[in-house]
């Protein structure tokens, strides 16, 4: 091999290393740029409303009044309600797959079903919710004698609950499986039943991991847009019951962003986006941190 | 007569600050098998990895001293050239899993982008496989994946891969430790054949193996070269007490 | 007495197990419902005309979703062109530099990127591309989807590269193969199935994304091949038609949903096959 082609190899190598380095840098720059862009475009709204933006109860583009409280309330209500409903289900799946049926047809059926559930686009959930769930809720509301909107916080929570199960369940399964078998065997050898082992050994051991799964599911629920937008009713007021129509942070952006003409309106919507970005980032980082710590420990 | 192909002078090697090899001096002769022996962790692998400049690839690893290949210091040469001239076979057979047997043998050319015509390729593959005593076993399915072969066959494939580059020296790091007795004796026969063409440096734990195949033996202990001489002498009348203790199984 | 508590404990154990099994299977009922409705309402709309024609005006019968199919295809191509090379390169960097400050920071950013709600990515593509070009466009939609694909590709690339044994790299380097050739010709091919899996997964993930397209690709009733103009996409069409007041449009939306779900499911199956068939034995 000649000297020339060797120095070419050396240069290609430097070039290659440089490209790798730059691609890694690019990802970092990308995330910072996303944050900065959101921040910069939020400035008009931050200047106008300050912290009051978070507590303002009125969102009225016609009068140029932008308070985000209705959406904060809407987001928190739908997300937490969905989490609350999903916990017994995702816990069951975690225990089912992590302890009772770790392999076999039973578990592979459930596993693939959950994978498919996670893979179905949210627009499909929304569409289905709008045409199947909403009429169902409406007839329920008529029976109960409440205003039969059909759409609203509760309907959105139901859809969200279905959508987030795969997230908390898959992490829950992982952490349940991480419980060292010595602990379980020790308890079994003392004559404990399966149920007692699960309650006294597995769940306490896996507690923080299960919590992490719930956090990651929360991160997903907070930012979910289409499914919620289609069934929540899109009303910019603070909901007075869990059956009232409302809006979440994500759904108000979806509804109004394309039509936002006023600079201040756009800026307020971007600021809601910024809030979503920051909150989901914190929730995700904490969740992943817990999962990582757990898998390192065992 | 007997000529030196590789000369190691005051070679020291480090991992971070820890000095693993301490001023090793050693001469390797052409067409001879030199065995390197010593207890586990004494630096045998490190030593041969310094010879083809693989040691410096580990983060924090350093080398001092000089190694001459045909009178030229390899640490002033391009490592890529050095590695093409000094072939290496590892403890665990490591054929390229994405390539078939043919491509595995010719891999040194293909991966380096060295263009040679098909006939020449065929010739190199056949010759290398024959030298590695594998040709008869694989000539009918050269286009199957190399990973389907048995462990011993895989190891011979790796030897063929190294031979294809026409190296001056082949480094073998415990090439039989992952193999069964039959494959081991195959490889040992092969080593005796190969030394007609190249110098061989063989790291081994197996005292009997060193005695069977090597012309010279170096005994390494805690990073120091304790003793070096003809195998005959080392295995019959070792000078150093530590060598004797090792050979009689006191440690290692 | 003693015997009583034991049998009570065993009973509790059985009840609990029954409960776990019941709740687990109840949670996949919605999936069955959804698939049932999509198939029931969607399959009747599907025919050759549906797949190859443009939508008709309200009141006219028939019409299809060809513009949305083409749009989704174009959006996916743009996003793959943007995300695949970059994601693979960053993945290589991370697997080659397991420790180090930049790797740590990059991994953190990939995590953050993965968690960003898709609607926020839509805002970003709007601010960066739509605002600077002054128009909604396929390109801006592709940028949004590309950003969403990145974290999946980076992570799967890093994970699969880490599984490639170090011995292979040594084998190549010991033949005098330069570092970059070793990575490109030995390590990458050995990890190919995992990397392709990652790409397919990320495509499956973004094909159904609607939120980031609402104010980027925007949607269009026409067939469009110009990436600087607004373009339709399957999920956008579903959204617009499902929320319209016209029953004819609803049935088109069901048909489009059927197509979308089938596409995503097929991608998932292909992913499984690739993982199994292409798996390199080390
Ligand atoms: N990557 C590394 N980083 C730090 N120290 C290392 C590394 N590799 C090896 N060492 C140390 O260097 C010393 C020599 O290792 P080496 O592998 O050369 O021994 P060896 O003689 O080949 O042993 P064996 O017979 O077990 O293969 C050992 O003490 C080992 O702990
Ligand atoms: Mg060794």
Image (cartoon, rainbow, N blue to C red):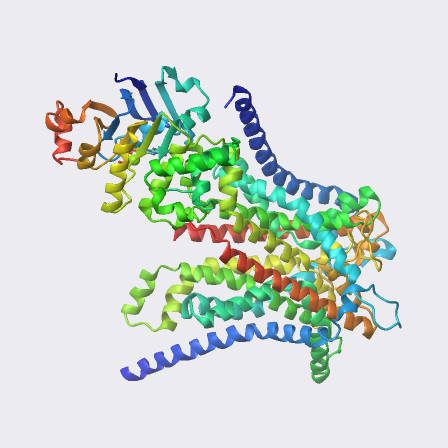
In the rendered view, tell whether residue A58 sits above or below residue B79.
below
Residue A230 falls in image quadrant: bottom right
Image quadrant for the N terminus of chain C? bottom left
- Residue A254 % position (x, y): 76, 58
From the top left corner, tell me how far across and down residue B240 is, in percent. Answer: 14, 23
Q: Is residue B149 visible?
A: yes
Q: To which quarter of the image does residue C171 belong?
A: top left
Q: Is residue A52 visible?
A: no
Q: Please give the name of the residue rendered at 57% of the width and 48% of the height, measured from the top-left corner.
A: C111
The residue depicted at 76 percent of the width and 57 percent of the height is C70
Task: Give how far across and how far down residue B114 sits, in percent.
Answer: 51, 30
Image quarter for residue B62?
Answer: top left
Return the residue found at the far top: B71
Q: Is residue C149 left or right of residue C128?
A: left
Name which residue lies at 48% across and 68% down. A108
Picture quarter with ligand 1? top left
Residue A208 falls left or right of residue B65: right
Q: Residue B4, relative to residue C180: is it above or below? A: above
> A283 and C82: which one is in front?
C82
């Amino acid at each position: 091999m000649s000297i020339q082609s060797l120095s070419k190899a050396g240069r290609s190598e430097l070039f290659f290393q440089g490209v790798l380095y730059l691609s890694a840098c690019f990802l970092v720059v990308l995330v910072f740029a996303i944050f900065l862009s959101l921040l910069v475009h939020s400035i008009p709204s931050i200047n106008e409303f300050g912290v009051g933006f978070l507590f303002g109860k009125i969102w009225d583009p016609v009068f140029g009044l932008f308070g985000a409280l209705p959406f904060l309330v809407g987001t928190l209500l739908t997300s937490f309600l969905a989490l609350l409903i999903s916990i017994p289900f995702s816990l069951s799946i975690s225990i089912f797959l992590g302890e009772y049926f770790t392999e076999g047809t039973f578990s592979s059926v459930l596993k693939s079903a959950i994978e498919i559930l996670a893979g179905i686009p949210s627009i499909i959930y929304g569409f289905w919710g709008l045409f199947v769930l909403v009429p169902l809720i409406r007839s329920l509301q008529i029976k109960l004698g409440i205003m039969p909107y059909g759409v609203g916080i509760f309907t959105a929570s139901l859809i969200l609950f279905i959508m987030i199960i795969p997230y908390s369940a898959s992490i829950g399964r992982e952490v349940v499986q991480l419980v060292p078998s010595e602990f379980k065997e020790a308890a079994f050898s003392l004559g404990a039943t399966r149920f007692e082992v699960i309650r006294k050994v597995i769940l306490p051991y896996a507690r923080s991991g299960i919590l992490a799964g719930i956090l990651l599911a929360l991160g997903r629920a907070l930012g979910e847009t289409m499914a919620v937008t289609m069934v929540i009713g899109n009303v910019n007021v603070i909901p007075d019951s869990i059956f009232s129509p409302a809006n979440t942070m994500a759904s108000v952006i979806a509804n109004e962003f394309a039509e936002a003409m006023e600079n201040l309106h756009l800026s307020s919507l971007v600021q809601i986006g910024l809030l979503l970005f920051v909150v989901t980032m914190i929730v995700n980082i904490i969740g992943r941190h817990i999962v990582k710590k757990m898998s390192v420990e065992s | 007569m007997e000529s030196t192909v590789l000369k190691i002078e005051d070679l020291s090697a480090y991992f971070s600050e820890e000095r693993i090899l301490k001023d090793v001096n050693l001469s390797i002769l052409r067409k001879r098998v030199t065995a390197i022996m010593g207890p586990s962790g004494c630096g045998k692998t490190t030593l041969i990895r310094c010879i083809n400049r693989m040691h410096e690839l580990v983060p924090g690893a350093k080398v001092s001293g000089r190694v001459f290949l045909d009178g030229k210091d390899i640490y002033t040469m391009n490592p890529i050239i050095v590695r093409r001239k000094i072939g290496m076979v590892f403890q665990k057979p490591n054929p390229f899993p994405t390539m078939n047997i043919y491509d595995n043998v010719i891999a040194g050319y293909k991966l380096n982008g060295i263009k040679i015509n098909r006939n020449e390729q065929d010739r190199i593959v056949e010759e290398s496989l024959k030298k590695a005593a594998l040709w008869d076993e694989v000539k009918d399915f050269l286009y199957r994946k190399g990973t389907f072969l048995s462990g011993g066959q895989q190891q011979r494939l790796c030897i063929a891969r190294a031979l294809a580059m026409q190296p001056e020296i082949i480094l073998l790091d415990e090439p039989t430790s992952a193999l069964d007795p039959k494959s081991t004796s195959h490889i040992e026969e092969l080593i005796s054949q190969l030394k007609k063409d190249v110098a061989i440096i063989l790291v081994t734990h197996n005292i009997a193996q060193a005695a069977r195949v090597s012309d010279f033996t170096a005994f390494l202990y805690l990073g120091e070269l304790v003793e070096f001489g003809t195998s005959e002498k080392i295995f019959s009348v070792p000078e150093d007490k530590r060598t004797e203790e090792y050979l009689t199984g006191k440690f290692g | 007495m003693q015997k009583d508590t034991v049998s009570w404990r065993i009973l509790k154990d059985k009840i609990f197990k029954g409960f776990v099994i019941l709740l687990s299977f109840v949670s996949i009922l919605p999936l069955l419902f959804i698939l049932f409705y999509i198939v029931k309402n969607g399959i009747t709309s599907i025919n050759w005309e549906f797949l190859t024609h443009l939508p008709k005006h309200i009141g006219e019968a028939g019409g299809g979703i060809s513009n949305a199919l083409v749009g989704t295809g174009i959006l996916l191509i743009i996003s793959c062109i943007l995300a695949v090379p970059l994601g693979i390169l960053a993945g290589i960097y991370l697997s080659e530099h397991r420790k180090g400050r930049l790797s740590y920071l990059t991994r953190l950013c990939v995590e953050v990127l993965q968690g960003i709600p898709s609607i926020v990515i839509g805002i970003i593509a709007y601010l960066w591309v739509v605002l600077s070009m002054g128009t909604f466009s396929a390109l801006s939609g592709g940028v949004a989807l590309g950003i969403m694909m990145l974290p999946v590709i980076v992570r799967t690339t890093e994970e699969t590269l880490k599984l490639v044994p170090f011995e292979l790299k040594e084998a190549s380097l010991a033949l005098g193969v330069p570092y970059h050739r070793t990575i490109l010709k030995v390590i990458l091919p050995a990890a190919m199935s995992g990397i392709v899996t990652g790409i397919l997964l990320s495509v499956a993930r973004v094909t159904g994304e609607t939120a980031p397209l609402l104010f980027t690709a925007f949607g269009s009733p026409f067939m469009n091949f110009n990436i600087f103009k607004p373009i339709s996409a399957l999920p956008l069409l579903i959204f617009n038609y499902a929320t319209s007041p016209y029953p004819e449009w609803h049935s088109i939306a069901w048909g489009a949903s059927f197509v979308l779900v089938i596409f995503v499911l097929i991608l998932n199956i292909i992913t499984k096959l690739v993982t199994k068939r292409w798996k390199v034995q080390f």
